[in-house]
Every structure is written in structure tokens, then in C-alpha cells.
Image: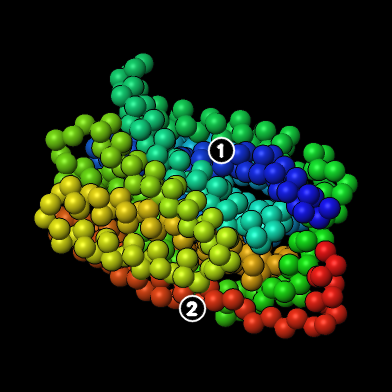
Amino acid sequence: MNIDLCSTTLKKLNAKIIPFIIICYFVANLDKTNISVAALQMNADLGLSASMYGLGVGMFYISYIIFEIPSNVIMTRVGARIWIARIMITWGIVSAGMSLVHTPTQLYVMRFLLGMAEAGFTPGIIYYISCWFPKSNRARAMSFFYMGSVLASVIGLPISGSILNMHGIADIAGWRWLFAMEGIPAIILGCLVLLRLPDTPNHATWLSADEKKWLNTRLQQENSDVEVGKHHSWASALRNKVVLMLSLVWFLQAFCSIGITLFLPLIIKSVATEQSNFVISVLSAIPFAFAAIFMYVNGRHSDLTKERSLHLGVPLIISGLLLAASIYTSNLFVAYIMLVLTVGFNFALTPIFWAVTTEKLAGVAAAASIAFINAIANFAGLGLPPLLGKIKDVTGSFHYGLLIIATALVIGGIVGIYVGRPAKVIVTKSSASSLSQH
């Protein structure tokens, strides 16, 4: 009976929750990263140097960091459905408003407001998934969720490149059309969240009473073994060694996921100057197609083997080594392939990381800790884009900046192997007896 309940319940979760949040995350990352394609026209129109562009990108992360933890704590009080809807509607309005900027200062202000509006979305969804999916299926669920991120690049970058070709229609620049058109879907989806996203399993009308009971019991049993649980306050959780080490890993991987993602079209354009903006956008999208495949394969294999540590750290080490090798490769095609694989391996650890995190954390402490971990990573977004832009302006090349990223990835992988090790959990006879009954 339990096997049948497990199967039917998980099938319903995969069908009802995962596709919808993939679409939401797709739009979130599209609105956050479409500035990388807009920059191909926008920088010249607004008179932005590489350093100024980097500052504009980084402004998003200032407000994102400030409001990340408060946003997730509020979500645990008002419910995921209402809060995620609020986030999506406000960021859609701000994203569309980016089309109205005329000066660098206005760009900085709008990017700051965009970070404020979107703060809490990613950790909120991660916490939401942990409240629905058992550990045995969590890495795969996380991999599907993060596919929304890479699809925003695989599909979104070429779409954004195509919208740039609307340049001149109604005497409006292509990059303005880009921001205006890509902000609207977030507003629509935010309204749909109110109709489609239940707060807890008990609110899911598409789960039977037996399925709700099985799922709640399973999640309660698993949360009893976490290292940072419901007895921790959100403030004390932020001082916990496990939380701090997880934050370090996610911060170091963000050197690639943030740094390369937001500069990839400009990096490729710098060595393929003869190519059109659309071709550049397509070349920039290919690495993320591999990222989607690597995430799924790594997440699925980790769930099947029940191994987390190596699945977490090794991909990050490989990613750093490949990026370093690409810098010193004279053959442009080989360097591009290495860059593709760098992005693929970097994203491969993502579902494992959040599976490990949500296996070690529970309760309000988990919501705050996940937001804290994600906020720390966004310091990379705050400091790295301006640094990469400055290095490019001074040296005329991105090579030294990429070497910094490669070093961070290798270090992050080593720490990841350590922190990903299973916790030492003491199982008493009574708890073992209880588990055996389910």
C-alpha cells in the first residue's frame, strides 16, 4: 500500500508542481539575465563602458542581498502562494520598466529595484520544494526546477537576440522592445500562481486524503534527522557551521553561474567580432543546453546511488579546470567547447547542492538559511561583474577575470566534497521501530 501511495503521490507532485515552477523560474532568469543580450545595443546607446555595465549588473545584487532573508521569513508567515505571486508581479512591472531608462543612473536605479522585487524568489521556491518532495526524489526535483534557469538561456537568449532585430520599429530601439516584451509574462504568471500553487500538501485538492497523510508523515520523519531543525531559530541557524560552509560553496560556484552567464555574449563577441548579434546569442545559448542535460543526469544518478558528496564537489572542480584550460588554448573552437563544458559541469552540481542543503535543514531555520546561502552567493554578483568589466577595460581581455573564476570553482569543489558528506545521525531503537512501520 505504501509503495502504491508513494508512486501515485510523487507522480502527482511531478505533474502538478514541477512544470509550473519551471516556467516561473524560466521567466525569472530571463528577466534577470536578458540584460546580457540587451548590452549588445544598450551599452552604446547609454554610453556604458564595460565597467559601467558591470556596475549596472551588480546593482541588482545589492538589493537582492538586502531583502533576501526578510523575504523568505515573510513567506513562511503569509504562505508561498501569496508571496511568490507578489514577487513575480512586482518584478515583471520593474523589468518592463527597464525599457524606459535613458541614462546610466536610471539603469542603476532600475536594476536595484529589480533586485528588490525579485529577492526571495529562488530560495522561496527551493524551500517550497523541500516542503513537498521526500529526500529520495529531491535532487531530481531540484534539477527540473533549475532547468527553468538554463532554459532561460537555451531558449531565451536566441529569443532575446531576435527581439533585438526589432530595432527601429515605431522608432524604438531593439533593446527597449526586449525589456518591455519580456517583463509581461512575469506579471501574467504571478496572477496564475494564486490559482495554481497550493501552500502545503494539505491545501492540494488534487491529492487524496491517504496521499496527504503519507506525504506529511514521510516529510516529518525525514525532518527529524536534520542537523539544523525546527528547534533552531532562524538567527542561530545563520551562525551554524554547516550553513556557513554551504554558503561558501554556493558563493564560489556563483563565480561561474553569475559571472559567465552575465558576460557570456560579450565574451564571445570579443573573439567573434564578425558575427551578428543573433549568432552571438545562439552561441551563448548552447552551453546551457548542456547544463540542462548535466543537471538531470547528475541529479538522477545521485538520487539512485544515494551519494551526495562526490556528485556535489567533483563537477565544480572539473568546471574550474576546464575554464582554466580554455584560457590557454589558442584554438578558438576548442576553447569554445571547453567553455560549453565549463558551464555544463558548473550547473551539474546545482540540484545536488540544494538536495544536500534541504536534507541538513528544516523548518523556519531552513527558509532563513536557504535565503542566507543564496544571498551570500549574490555577493559574487555584486562584486564580480564590476571586477570583470574593469579587468576588460584595463587589459583588453577577459582572461585574467576568467582565471579568477576558475580558481574559485576548484576551491568550491573541494569544500563541496567535505560539506556534502552524510551527517552522523544517531537512530534510537524507538525511532528505528517507528520508521520500520512506514
In the rendered structure, which disc, 2 or 1, sits on the residue that comes first in sequence?
A: 1
Residue 116 seen:
no
Under circle 2, the secondary element is helix
| Image location of residue 11, percent across then percent down | 70, 44
Give the Cα separation between the discs numbered 2 and 1. Answer: 33 Å
Answer few, some or many: residues within 10 Å of disc 1's Cα (few below 14, many 20 plus, some between 14 and 19): some
Circle 1 sits on which residue?
23
Seen from the viewer's position, the closer of residues 201 and 99 is 201
Q: Is residue 154 left or right of residue 366?
A: left
Q: Residue at x 53, y 30 (%)?
A: 184
| Image location of residue 60, percent across then percent down | 45, 51
Which residue, as the protein is rendered here, is positioned at the far top? 170
- Which is closer to the viewer, label 2 or label 1? 2
Which residue, as the protein is rendered here, is positioned at the far right? 209
| Image location of residue 18, percent across then percent down | 62, 43
Amino acid found under the numbered disc labelled 2: Tyr
Q: Is residue 34 above or below residue 118?
A: above
